[in-house]
Image: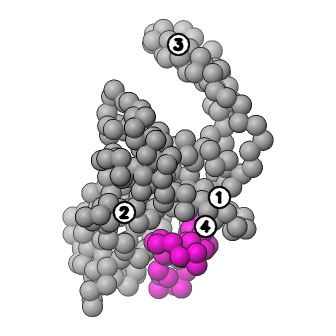
Amino acid sequence: MAGPELPSTDALNTLGLGDALLERFPAGLINTSWLVVVPGGERRVLQRVNPMFPPEVNADIDVVTRHLESRGLTTPRLIPMPNGKPYLETQDEVWRQFTYIAGNTYDAVQNTHQADEAGALLGRFHRAVGDLEHTFVNARSGVHDTAKHVANLSTTLAQYKDHPQITPVQALADEVFELVNGLPDLGDMPDRIVHGDPKISNIVFADGTNEALCLIDLDTLGRMPIVLDLGDAFRSWCNPLDEDEPGAEFSLLIFHSAIGG
């Protein structure tokens, strides 16, 4: 079926889902996702992939999720499309299907038990991919290159020094510079396979038990020092508020539970 908020009938037929039932997922900022129920009752996740990701990113996802599954971890798996590939291109759109993992996602950590579970899951993930040898097609570079970001900020401030809003912006920039100068030297930490965006909303929790089941939104997989993946996780997990709300906090109670997990 097709209609408002649904792919076109032509797209569904091309995807082999002309007889499926679809319901739009309300969450998700980058890719557009639907819960799909095919004849017979099997549930899947259909996604229209954001153009910011090359279609080949799905090859990386396929390799890593196969490896995770071989290590006994729960993970969404790509379902081959009608062309036999893990994705299908129709005109200017890229589509893919994942196996569906029932559970709940949250925009903020609900309690310390959930934080402990999230930490344990991320640890299992890092351990499971620790022996995977893979050259990523979608190689993300410079995502956490602090020196590069600071240099870009300095250049931009100089370029717009006469802008009418330069005074408040400069004040914020000065705070950034001061904080950056206080960062510890991480030394020569090796790059490892990481999730790349392990925020709390990218973790599926079991209904009722709040057991952390798996990580989702895998387009950000790549290599970087593991401490950066942990830092990105704690930035999200330890803020009791939604990440878009002002007045963000860092809860040490949640942090201790997460790092303990």
Name the amino acid type tagged 2: Glu
- Give the side of residue 22 with respect to residue 248, left or right: left
Q: CA distance from mark 3 to mark 2?
A: 44 Å
- Residue 162, above or below 88: above
- The tag earlier along the polypeptide, 3 or 2, is 3
CB atoms at circles 3 and 1 under 8 Å apart?
A: no
> How many other residues sit within 10 Å of disc 3, few (<14), some (14-19) or many (≥20)?
some
> How many other residues sit within 10 Å of disc 2, few (<14), some (14-19) or many (≥20)?
some
Residue 170: mark: 3
* Residue assigned mark 2: 211
Residue 114 at what x, y percent from top left? 36, 53
CB atoms at circles 4 and 2 under 8 Å apart?
A: no
Q: Secondary structure at mark 1?
A: strand
Which residue is painted at 49% across and 17% down in the image?
Answer: 172
- Is residue 45 found inside the magenta-colored segment of the image? no
- The tag earlier along the polypeptide, 3 or 1, is 3
Residue segment shown in magenta = 57-85
Q: Nearer the viewer, mark 3 or mark 1?
A: 1
Q: Nearer the viewer, mark 2 or mark 1?
A: 2
* Residue assigned mark 1: 193
Q: Nearer the viewer, mark 3 or mark 4?
A: 4
Q: CA distance from mark 3 to mark 1?
A: 36 Å
- The tag earlier along the polypeptide, 4 or 2, is 4
* Residue assigned mark 4: 128
- Give the side of residue 174 with respect to residue 190, left or right: left
Q: CA distance from mark 1 to mark 4?
A: 10 Å
For residue 129, say whether it is visible.
yes
CB atoms at circles 3 and 2 under 8 Å apart?
A: no
